[in-house]
Image (cartoon, rainbow, N blue to C red):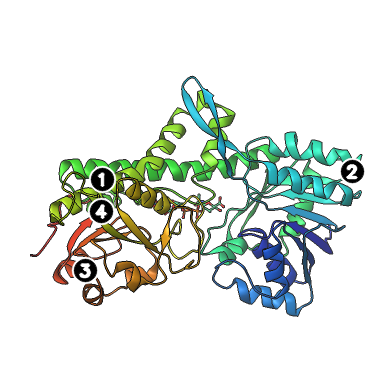
C-alpha cells in the first residue's frame, strides 16, 4: 500500500520521533496532540522532550515542508496511534486479596474516536501504544466501526508495538526488529509497506493479539528480572556480600544475565505494563504480581539504607530517628539515566518517604531543573542541593553525576555521608575525599577511611 499522507496521534516520546522520521523521509505527516504546549513548541520548531538527535530530525522534517501539527486529526491514507497508556492513579482492582493497578485506556479511546470522522475506505490504522491483550480487536475495532466501515474489509487495522528505548530512540526506531500484527494478512502487509520506508531491522508478521502480548511479555520479563536483582541486593546486605561483585561474577556464566539492582523501577512502560496482565488475569499472574511488589517496595529499602548510613556516621541531632531533621541532597529525579522523563520515578518515591520520616530533602535533576513534582523541593543547581546537606543520596546514574569529582564536592558540602543506589561511584575515591561511602546492595566495602 502506498501512503502519501500519514496522521500520527500523540506527539510524545514515541509519536514525535515517528512523525519527524517519516516526514524527513518524504511522507507528508500531520501530527496531533491534545496538549497545546506541545503544539506551540513544535510549531516554533522546538522539540519538547530531551532525546539525542531528535531536534536534528525535526529540523530536517520542517525544512522539507513535510510536517504539520495541530490538535485535530486530518484525512490521511494511514493513521498511527501513539498515545500513553498509563495506569489509573485513583482506582484499583481486587481479586482474592490481591490489589492491582488498572490500565487507563482513555487516551487510546479518544484518539480512536477522533479518527472515526476521518476514516475512509482503503485507509490503514495502526495502534502502537502498549495495550492490554485484545485491545485492537475489542476496543479499537468497535470504535472505528462507528464510521460504518468494517475493519479488515473496508480498511486495514494492525497492532505494531513501539519497542524503542528512551535515550536511544532514533537508532532503535530504525534498527530494531519490528512486529506487525494485522487483523487480516492484508492489514499486516499494508503496515509492512509503510514501516519499510525506514525500518532496517527485520519485520515479522503475526496477528494483532500476539503482537500485543509480545510487547507486554518483553517489558514484564524485564520487570521480573530487575525484581530478582533487587532481591539479590537485599540478600547481599544480609549476608555481608557486595551484590555488584556477585552479579559480575555470576554473569560470567554463559547463560546468566542478571540485571542491575537500583532504587526501583520507573518510567511509563516497565513499571506499568505488567499490571495490564495482572488486571486481565489476576489468577494467572502470581509471579508477575510479586515482582511488581518487590520493585515498588525498593524505595523503602533505599530509605532504610540512608537511615543506617546516617546512624553509623552518628550525624548529630534527633537520636530517635536517624532521619529526623536531617538534610539530604537527592541527586537525580528522572526514572533512569540521561533522560528528562520523571514519570513513575522511584527517586520521587524515595524522596517522599524520607520526608515522611522527618528528613528535609533538596532534589537536583539536571535534565529537568524546572520540573514541579508534588511535595518535592527542587534545587536550582548541584551546589545549592548539596551545600548544607548531612548526606548525599545518588538516585540516578546520569553521566554528569558519574563524572563528578568527589574532591570538588567535598569542598562544597557539609555532608560526609554518601549513599550510592546505582553503583555509579568508586568507593575508594569518595572515601579518599573524606566521605563515609555506602552503596546499595554492598555490605562488603569498608565504609570509611577515617
Ligand atoms: N532498571 C533497573 N535495573 C536495570 C535496568 C533498568 O533498575 O538493570 C530500571 C531503570 O532505572 C528504570 C526502569 O528500570 O527505572 C525501566 O528502564 P529500562 O531502561 O529498562 O526501560 P524503559 O522503560 O526506558 O524502556 C522499556 C524498554 N523495554 C525493554 O527493554 C524490554 C523499551 O525497549 C520499550 O520500548 C519501552 O520500555 C516501552 O516503551 O515500552
SS at circle 2: loop
Q: Quadrant of residue 297?
A: top left
Question: Mark 1 or mark 4: which is in front?
Answer: 4
Disc number lying in front (2 or 4): 4
Crowding at dot 2, Cα within 10 Å, few <14 / some 14-19 / many 20+, comes out as some
Q: Do residues under tags 3 and 4 come within 8 Å of each other at their CB atoms?
A: no
- SS for callout 3: loop
In the picture of the structure, the residue carrying the numbered disc 4 is 325
Residue behind mark 2: 154
Report the quarter where the C terminus lies: bottom left
Q: In which quarter of the image is the N terminus?
A: bottom right
Check mark 1 vs ligand 1: CB closer than 8 Å? yes or no: no
Query: Which residue is farthest top?
Result: 96
Judged left or right of residue 106, residue 284 is left
Q: Mark 3 points at which residue?
A: 414
Sequence-first disc among 2 and 3: 2
- Disc 3 from disc 1: Cα separation: 22 Å
- Find numbered disc 1 in the image and state the secondary structure of the residue it sits on: helix
Relative side of 79 to 228, left or right: right
How far apart in space, not on screen, are marks 2 and 4 (Cα)? 66 Å
Asked if marks 2 and 3 touch (Cβ < 8 Å), the reply is: no
Q: Which percent across, then down, holds residue 179? A: 64, 49
Residue neighbourhood size for the residue with mark 3, other residues' Cα within 10 Å, grouped as few (<14), some (14–19), many (≥20):
some
Question: Image point 58% across, 58% down: which residue?
Answer: 176
Q: Mark 1 points at which residue?
A: 304
- Looking at the rendered image, the disc whose residue lies closer to the viewer, 2 or 3, is 3
Q: Of callouts 3 and 1, which one flags the residue occurring earlier in the amino acid sequence?
A: 1
Residue plotted at (71% across, 45% down): 108
- Give the mark nearer the N terminus: 1 vs 4: 1
Amino acid at each position: 500500500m502506498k501512503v502519501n499522507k500519514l496522521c500520527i496521534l500523540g506527539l510524545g516520546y514515541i509519536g514525535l520521533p515517528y512523525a519527524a522520521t517519516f516526514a524527513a523521509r518524504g511522507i507528508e505527516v500531520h501530527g496531533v496532540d491534545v496538549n497545546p504546549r506541545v503544539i506551540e513548541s513544535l510549531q516554533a520548531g522546538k522539540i519538547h522532550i530531551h532525546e539525542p538527535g531528535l531536534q536534528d530530525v525535526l529540523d530536517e522534517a520542517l525544512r522539507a515542508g513535510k510536517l504539520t501539527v495541530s490538535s485535530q486529526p486530518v484525512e490521511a491514507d494511514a493513521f498511527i496511534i501513539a498515545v500513553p497508556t498509563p495506569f489509573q492513579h485513583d482506582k484499583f482492582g481486587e481479586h482474592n486479596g490481591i490489589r492491582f493497578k488498572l490500565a487507563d485506556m482513555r487516551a487510546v479511546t479518544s484518539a480512536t474516536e477522533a479518527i472515526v470522522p476521518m476514516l475512509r475506505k482503503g485507509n490503514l490504522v495502526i495502534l502502537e501504544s502498549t495495550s492490554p491483550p485484545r485491545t485492537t480487536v475489542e476496543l479499537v475495532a468497535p470504535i472505528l466501526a462507528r464510521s460504518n466501515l468494517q475493519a479488515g474489509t473496508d480498511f486495514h487495522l494492525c497492532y505494531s508495538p513501539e519497542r524503542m528505548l528512551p535515550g536511544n530512540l532514533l537508532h532503535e526506531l530504525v534498527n530494531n526488529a519490528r512486529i506487525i500484527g494485522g487483523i487480516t494478512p492484508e492489514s499486516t502487509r499494508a503496515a509492512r509497506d509503510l514501516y519499510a520506508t525506514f525500518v532496517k531491522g527485520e519485520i515479522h508478521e503475526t496477528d494483532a493479539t500476539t503482537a500485543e502480548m509480545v510487547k507486554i511479555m518483553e517489558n514484564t520479563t524485564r520487570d521480573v528480572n530487575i525484581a530478582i536483582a533487587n532481591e539479590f541486593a537485599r540478600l547481599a546486605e544480609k549476608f555481608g556480600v557486595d551484590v555488584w561483585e556477585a552479579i559480575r561474577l555470576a554473569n560470567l556464566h554463559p547463560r546468566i544475565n542478571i540485571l542491575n539492582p537500583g532504587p526501583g523501577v520507573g518510567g511509563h512502560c516497565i513499571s506499568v505494563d505488567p499490571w495490564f496482565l495482572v488486571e486481565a488475569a489476576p489468577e494467572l499472574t502470581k509471579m508477575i504480581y510479586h515482582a511488581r511488589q518487590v520493585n515498588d517496595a525498593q524505595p523503602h529499602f533505599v530509605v532504610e539504607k540512608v537511615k543506617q548510613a546516617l546512624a553509623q556516621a552518628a550525624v548529630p541531632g534527633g537520636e530517635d530517628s536517624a532521619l529526623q531533621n536531617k538534610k539530604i541532597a537527592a541527586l537525580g529525579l528522572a526514572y533512569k539515566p540521561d533522560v528528562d522523563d520523571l514519570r513513575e520515578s522511584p527517586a520521587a518515591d524515595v524522596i517522599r518517604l524520607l520526608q515522611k520520616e522527618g528528613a528535609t530533602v533538596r532534589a537536583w535533576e539536571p535534565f529537568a531543573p524546572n520540573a514541579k513534582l508534588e511535595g518535592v523541593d527542587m534545587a536550582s543547581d548541584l551546589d545549592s542541593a548539596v551545600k548544607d546537606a548531612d548526606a548525599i543520596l545518588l538516585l540516578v546514574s546520569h553521566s554528569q553525576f558519574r563524572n563528578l569529582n568527589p574532591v570538588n564536592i567535598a569542598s562544597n558540602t557539609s555532608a560526609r555521608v554518601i549513599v550510592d543506589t546505582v553503583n555509579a561511584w568508586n568507593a575508594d575515591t569518595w572515601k579518599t575525599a573524606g566521605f563515609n561511602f555506602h552503596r546499595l546492595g554492598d555490605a562488603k566495602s569498608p565504609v570509611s577511611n577515617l
